[in-house]
Amino acid sequence: MGSPGAPSGPPFDIPGFTVSGALPPYLGATPVDPALMSPFETTLVRIANKLCRSAERREIFTGLLKYRQELKKLGFTTGFQWLSGSFMEDIETLEKRHPGDVDVVVFAPRPSGVADDAGMQAFMTKNINLFHPHFVKPVFHCDPYFVDLNLPPEYVVERSRYWFGLFSHRRVTGLWKGMLQVPLAVSQDDVDASKLLGMAP
């Protein structure tokens, strides 16, 4: 699979939850093979099939699919997303509750026509309803964060380090856990996942 600006690798069948109730942080005996390290590249259809077993989960994932469509309308057509949070855990068993949303880190180049930092800031302010979690979560059930791939490499590395460190560990226990990665570009995968969830194509 893979997408522009994203590390390339095979799409994974989503691993099962570990005995700790989370996705494993790596596959195999040791975490030395970068191809077997989280975030695991996968597909939306696989997520719909594996992690949308309840009405609450289907509602959250439907929101994510709709959110991806809105990002496409803004001109975000390349890049990738990291998916994490309680949606990626067996939270129903761990804490006897449903997930409340899905954490999303969007790695993307700026849309066409947004040339510099000031332009990007103005663009985000104009579309704050799709950038700020306060506005996004009630509508799309996503807790979104953005990494601008047009910024200097040092900044991209620093932001990636931060989000990976934050979302690859359980907030309550500090347990190391896995994440999933999907391409940002809306594709037939979105259509097929929507059909699985009973959404109109």
Image: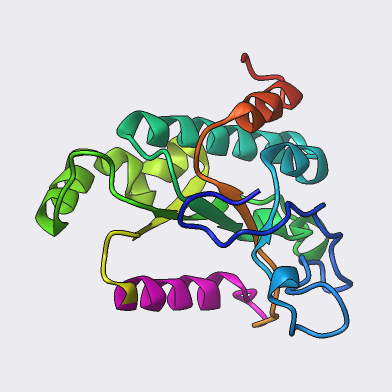
Identify the main secondary structure in magenta. Answer: helix
Compared across the picture, whether 70 is left or right of 16 comes to left
Q: Is residue 69 above or below residue 176?
A: above
Where is residue 27? Give x, y as percent.
82, 72
Answer with the quarter of the image where residue 22 lies.
bottom right
| Residue 9 is a magenta residue | no
Compared across the picture, whether 19 is left or right of 118 comes to right
Does residue 101 show up? no
Residue at point 15%, 49% (across, down): 115
Q: Is residue 149 above or below residue 27?
A: above
Residue furthest top in the image: 200
Where is residue 36? Give x, y as percent.
75, 70
Of 65 and 137, which appears nearest the observer? Answer: 65
Answer with the quarter of the image where residue 169 lies.
bottom right
| Residue 172 is a magenta residue | yes
**How many callouts does the rendering have?**
0
